[in-house]
Image: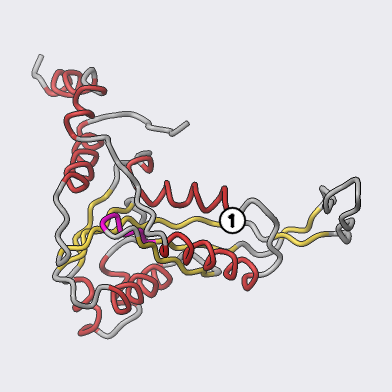
């Protein structure tokens, strides 16, 4: 169940901005990416797993030792069904800018613009690029980027969340005791989905939002009327 939170005029404005972007026709020169990041718990077994037998599959002890967490950064191209992910040990402005800089350089260097759907986290700014790159390079990246922020408690509007849901079910539902092992599995998942060009079929539109959430629109207008 998604946590939608309070729907006010700012929520509605950001929601409609993202939904309107999703409704636009495909333009190869104006890339549409959805970005998000997800921490991933790293654990190691306290005792050795029991091997598989004729009567039992491989069994793990419930007890485990927590290790330093990893962070997966993911950008999903809604038009091509391609996703790009990388693993980091932290979630900083440097990680954010480094990841997107690599994605742009390796995959979208020729794009005129990149419309980026993301949440309004403090690290998700154009200024982050100036912490990593020279002013000339930072400007080259930021001049391409057009930010579209989801509303607060509006992560359900970000297609990258759907990708993370799939990644969690198909890849992260096991224990990883090293960044290398996690990266190997995550990259294999990425490659398999990219080979199939798996696309998300998004059907929630601006008109649908105005219909399903119509009780919130008059309430917003009423709050602003003078008494």
Which quadrant is the C terminus positioned in? top left
Residue at horizontal 17%, vertical 30%? Answer: 207
Vertical placement of 104 versus 206: above or below? below
Q: With respect to residue 143, does 213 lie above or below? A: above
Residue 195 location in percent, x, y? 42, 64
User: Is label 1 in a helix, a strand or a loop?
Assistant: loop
Q: What residue is at 27 percent from the left and 36 percent from the top?
A: 203
Position of residue 66 measured from the top left corner of the image (x, y, whole percent):
72, 58
> Closer to the camera, 184 or 125?
184
Report which quarter residue 209 is drawn in: top left
User: Is 61 displayed left or right of 11 in the figure?
Assistant: right
Q: Which residue is mark 1?
A: 171
94 part of magenta stretch: no
Q: Which residues are magenta?
A: 75-79
Toward the left, the furthest residue is 226
As drawn, is 78 to the left or to the right of 88? Answer: left
Q: Quadrant of residue 37?
A: bottom left
Q: How is the image coloured?
A: secondary structure
Residue 115 vs residue 58, the one in the foreground? 58
- In the rendered image, which quarter is residue 140 located in? bottom left
């Amino acid at each position: 169940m998604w946590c939608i939170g309070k729907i006010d005029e700012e929520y509605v404005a950001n929601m409609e901005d993202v939904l309107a972007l999703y409704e636009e026709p495909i333009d190869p020169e104006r890339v549409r990416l959805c970005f998000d990041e997800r921490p991933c718990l790293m654990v190691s077994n306290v005792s050795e797993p029991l091997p598989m037998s004729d009567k039992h599959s491989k069994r793990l002890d419930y007890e485990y030792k927590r290790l330093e967490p990893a962070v997966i950064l993911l950008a999903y191209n809604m038009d091509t069904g391609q996703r790009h992910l990388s693993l980091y040990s932290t979630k900083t402005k440097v990680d954010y800018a480094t990841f997107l800089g690599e994605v742009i350089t390796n995959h979208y260097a020729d794009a005129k613009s990149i419309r980026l759907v993301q949440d309004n986290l403090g690290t998700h700014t154009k200024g982050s690029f100036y912490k990593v790159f020279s002013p000339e390079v930072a400007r080259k990246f930021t001049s391409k980027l057009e930010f579209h922020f989801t509303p607060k408690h509006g992560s359900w509007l970000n297609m990258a969340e759907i990708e993370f849901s799939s990644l969690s079910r198909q890849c992260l539902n096991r224990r990883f005791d090293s960044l290398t092992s996690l990266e190997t599995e995550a990259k294999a998942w990425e490659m398999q989905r990219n080979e199939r060009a798996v696309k998300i079929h998004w059907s929630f539109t601006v008109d649908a939002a105005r219909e399903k959430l119509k009780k919130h629109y008059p309430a917003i207008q009423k709050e602003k009327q003078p008494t």
